[in-house]
Amino acid sequence: MSGERLLSVLNHVGFFLNQNDMVNLSLVSRKFHNSFAIDQLYAKLRITEHPILRAERSYLDCGITYLSGYRSAIKSHNQNDMFLYDKIELLLESGHIGKIKEFIIEENVFHDVKEGRILLGKLVARIIDIGDVERLELRDNELLRVFYEKILQLQHLKHIDIFDFNLLGSITAMHNVSELKLVANEAPIPCNGSLFGDDLLAALETKIEQLIISVNDYAFSTYRLFQFLESESVKFSKLTALKLDLVHAPFDFSHDAHEMIVNYMSKYMQLEKLSNLEITFCCPFEDCTCHEDFLLDLAPHLKSLKQLGLIEKALMNKGHHYAVEDWDLAMCNFLLNIPNVGEKLKVLALKHDPPLNGIAEDTVDGNYKRRRKLFDNVLPRLYSLEKLIIPRMLQSISPYEILVCDLLWNGCTCDFCKTYLPVFDQYLMNHQYYPEDKGRFTDMIPPVFLGYVGEILARRTDTNRVEWELDTLRLAPENQLWDFHGFENIQHFQEYECHFNENFFPMLATCISHFFNGYMYHIVQYLPKLRLALLSGVYYSVDSMDNPIPETFYEPNHETFFTTIVDTSTSDALKCPTRFESLYD
């Protein structure tokens, strides 16, 4: 193979290497280093508080370089800050900052916020001065406030966030922008005089392919934003991806509002060409059907839909079974009314909003079975689905006590679970928590315990890290651990000597993933083309024989295998108890 051809091959292979492997490859040869390795290492940078988990099969940790804190299960805030601080200082000394094309700082990366912001500000200022960055996201509100107007003046941006509509005139270069985020906040949207010049309107119509309409304040109605866009005759004719926060705010939403929004979308967005759609629903009113009415009006227009995300944001009746079931019915009815959904839909993300502590109403066994039967009837219709994302699976089932009791006491029969499940049973027997509604300490029970566990697992793929739930499988999960205390003032009994800390959490995550195996073997029977799935921080790939294989995460030194499943090669690791199997009848 010629040298040029080898470089071309390695250049393409590089997208399947994580940052450690890419660094090693760059050290092999100066030619490798200069030709592609250093460019790929710096192209996409993301600063996070916690280190990421390294994946074995699914390439989750490839394509992005992560700067994060101390990779240790037990660490202090100061230790984590020191490691991250040193890494950013080294980056500031680099001569390759100009190669950065995408730069994202996640929220709350430093515990010492003041010192951290000073350092991050130096780095952001340096990147802005160079001016070659194409995507710059600052999820720290103070940093964003300081640099926002300068970001709008960058000449090569492909992604722009609009937080203040009065600054629309500050955008100096729209010719490269293909992704736009409009954020409705507490400030009223200007209604007098046009904020959109002819050049800006033309750019929005002909350039924008991805649009996010976000609502930060849930007292602010999405309807008002669409009224504003319609009054300005803003068109998005090239749109292929739309993320929408649909908020039904008090005193600011008419009965015909959803019709107006759908009419605007069909007129100015060409919904028939939309391939990616993600909607977050927020309605504070009981017995309101706004989300169902909106979806039924929208469904017939979605003739090219390939990726769909449906997200619940509950302000009222959180944890009430019948409210959740109504949401399930609306979502499933919407799915069945999308034209040719079985042939075209490839990716589906469903995110419920269950109570944090797993305490809900009317969560009897029969209600669980009825909800499961609903999805049993709908999932087979999605026979072309390749990716399934359910980031709060464990939190959604934790209120059903019979399920989580089975997990802990009649769970997987493999040697690993037989060793560790009794350990977590001991934890339950010796800990208590303080629910505010009761005003006293209460014994820890399985729904509460696994509700908290589900929250920690969900933080691996927190929405603060991904703009779209549909993009969850493109990002490496964070190494989120729990010390088995905190939340609602969890503490052990005085006479008990507690040794539970972060070191125990990977074992619990493995037991959870064994429990999910039963669900996955059920799901793959319905979805013959499924290849990737995410259930509450547990990742699965599906092989050609329709066997779901849980992703194994490991530490970079390859010595410690970390979370999900240690061994799925033996049939014992996949056994389910009789009671668990009966729930699939």
Image (cartoon, grey):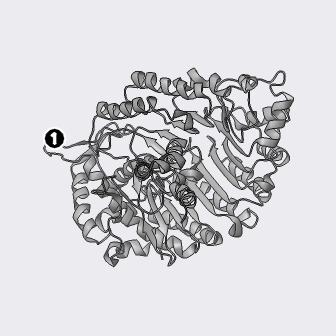
Front in this rendered view, residue 426 or 553:
553
Residue 306 visible in the snapshot: yes
Q: Position of residue 486 (x, y in %)?
A: 31, 39
From this view, report whether residue 303 is shown above or below residue 67.
below
Count of labels shown?
Answer: 1
Residue 576 visible in the snapshot: no
Judge the density around disc 1: few (<14), some (14-19), many (≥20) Cα neighbours within 10 Å.
few
Q: Position of residue 533 (x, y in %)?
A: 51, 62
SS for tag 1?
A: loop
Front in this rendered view, residue 7 or 195:
7
Type of the residue with mark 1 = Gln
Q: Position of residue 281 (x, y in %)?
A: 63, 46
From this view, report whether residue 275 is shown above or below residue 217.
below
Residue 507 in the figure: left or right of residue 454: left
Report which residue position mark 1 lands on: 494
Residue 423 in the figure: left or right of residue 144: left
Q: Residue at x 43, y 70 (%)?
A: 518
Q: Residue at x 30, y 53 (%)?
A: 557
Residue 122 in the figure: left or right of residue 220: left
Front in this rendered view, residue 33 or 538:
33
Q: Position of residue 297 (x, y in %)?
A: 78, 53
